[in-house]
Image (cartoon, rainbow, N blue to C red):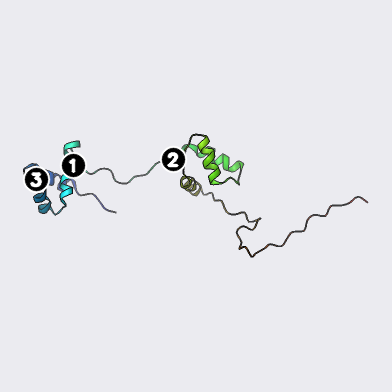
């Protein structure tokens, strides 16, 4: 992953620019682009510092507040779909994308596999042997 330039270099570039050299001269001297000289100078004027901004970090999970409700909802109805959960969350005024729900399920170790009893996981040409129906005892 790329790293920001050092603060030492940034300070020297901005000091050279402030001392009266053109942005092109400074860029050529330090081996950086003209736009970098300009942006660092603007940052120094706006914030008083030439330090780089924060890189990366973690985004908070949008569904973390709904975790307990979602787990209870999935336990109560194992056949609920992600689209169905998305609609129910919208009714609760929680806007979540399909991908956010999928990521939640993955993080929780839950999966929605196809129903094996209905042979959905098999190829269309495969048919399971029919199980015999229970015989109804007739009264004699």
Question: Can you give x and y, in whole percent of width and height, for residue 3 in the image?
Answer: 25, 51
- Between the residue at mark 2 and the residue at mark 3, the CA separation in whole angstroms equals 45 Å
| Residue depicted at 77% across the width and 58% down the height | 132
Question: Can you give x and y, in whole percent of width and height, for residue 69 in the image?
Answer: 54, 37
| Residue depicted at 12% across the width and 47% down the height | 13
Secondary structure category for the residue under label 1: loop
Q: Quadrant of residue 115?
A: bottom right
Q: Nearer the viewer, residue 48 or 45?
A: 45
Residue linked to disc 2: 62
Q: Nearer the viewer, residue 82 or 113?
A: 82
Residue linked to disc 3: 16
The disc, 2 or 1, on the residue closer to the chain's N-terminal end is 1
Secondary structure category for the residue under label 2: loop
Residue at the limit of the structure toward the right, as seen here: 140
The disc, 2 or 3, on the residue closer to the chain's N-terminal end is 3
The disc, 1 or 3, on the residue closer to the chain's N-terminal end is 3
- Between the residue at mark 2 and the residue at mark 1, the CA separation in whole angstroms equals 33 Å
Question: Can you give x and y, in whole percent of width and height, for residue 135 in the image?
Answer: 82, 55
Disc 2 crowd rating (10 Å Cα; few below 14, some 14-19, many 20+) is: some
Q: Quadrant of residue 127?
A: bottom right
Residue linked to disc 1: 50
Question: Can you give x and y, in whole percent of width and height, for residue 105 in the image?
Answer: 51, 47
């Amino acid at each position: 992953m790329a790293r920001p330039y050092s603060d030492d270099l940034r300070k020297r570039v901005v000091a050279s620019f402030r001392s009266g050299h053109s942005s092109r001269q400074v860029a050529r001297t330090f081996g950086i682009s003209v736009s970098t000289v300009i942006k660092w100078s603007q940052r120094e004027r706006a914030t008083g510092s030439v330090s780089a901004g924060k890189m990366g970090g973690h985004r908070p999970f949008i569904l973390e507040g709904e975790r307990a409700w979602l787990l209870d909802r999935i336990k109560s109805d194992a056949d609920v779909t992600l689209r169905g959960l998305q609609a129910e969350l919208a009714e609760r005024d929680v806007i979540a994308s399909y991908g956010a729900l999928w990521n939640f399920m993955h993080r929780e170790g839950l999966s929605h596999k196809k129903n094996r009893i209905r042979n959905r996981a098999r190829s269309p040409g495969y048919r399971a042997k029919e199980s015999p129906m229970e015989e109804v005892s007739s009264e004699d």
